[in-house]
Amino acid sequence: MRNTPFFTAWILASFLGAGSLGAAHPAVERQDTAAQVLEEVMATPERGIPLDLIQKAHCVIIVPGVKKVGFIFGGRYGKGVVSCRGAGGKGWTGPSTVRIEGGSVGLQIGGSSTDFVLLVMNERGAEKLIQSKFTLGADAAVAGGPVGRSAQAQTDAQMHAQILSYSRSRGAFAGISLEGATLRQDRDDNRRIYGKHVEPKAVLSGEIPAPESSRNLIATLTKYSSAAH
């Protein structure tokens, strides 16, 4: 009887351990978080991404909860997903995972968490995504995207940018330039999502079938990129 409390604790620990093993990996859960970010951004058309831009985009990158920490000198770090148009420009591919990294200088006290949405507007920009890494501004032209129901108010810089970028922090949503930030492929997280090693190029070209876990993300992209929306 003296061992009963120990035995009970051991059973409880085993049960909790088994439950954690069944939990989804953060890389898998991030797909649904990305879908939620896009849904919330588009919930107010007057302050969201113009639908005509999403309808023209070759790829969409969503990076939820990018962290910026530091005092005076700071840095950004976050993980997200990217999906591209399938063959013939129809449908969306399964997601490939990316990391965003980049330093910044300015008055920064404490930390913040920001959601980023990036629209890749042409084939040259899409080609950058299959590289192991590329720097926004240096390797691909980037500009803060216009906000509202229509993209007619684009500036020349926006019209010629390969990538249009947006940020949302503390409820405020706006186009923001991310020049200097680096995007890298994350093969480890891809393995978590697909259950095996997959090449980002094969994923983003549609050669690899989308996993069941990405159904919500693809449905959300389809919802807002459809001309009938």
Image: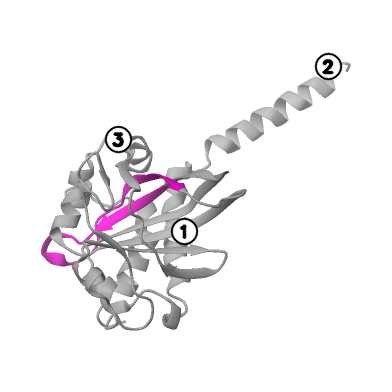
Q: Which mark is residue 3?
A: 2
Pointer 3 residue? 196
What element does badge 1 sit on?
strand
* Residue 22 visible somewhere in the drawing: yes
| Residue range corresponding to the magenta coloring | 79-104
Which numbered disc, 3 or 2, marks the residue closer to the eye? 3
- In the rendered image, the vertical position of residue 138 relative to residue 37, given as above or below: above
Q: Residues within 10 Å of mark 3 (few under 14, many from 20)?
A: few
Which numbered disc, 3 or 1, marks the residue closer to the eye? 1
Q: Disc 3 or 1, which lies upstream in sequence?
A: 1
Count of marks, rendered view? 3
Which residue is depicted at the point 44% across and 78% down?
47
Q: Residues within 10 Å of mark 2 (few under 14, many from 20)?
A: few
Residue 14's quadrant in the figure? top right
Q: Residue furthest top?
A: 2
Residue 188's quadrant in the figure? top left
What element does badge 2 sit on?
loop
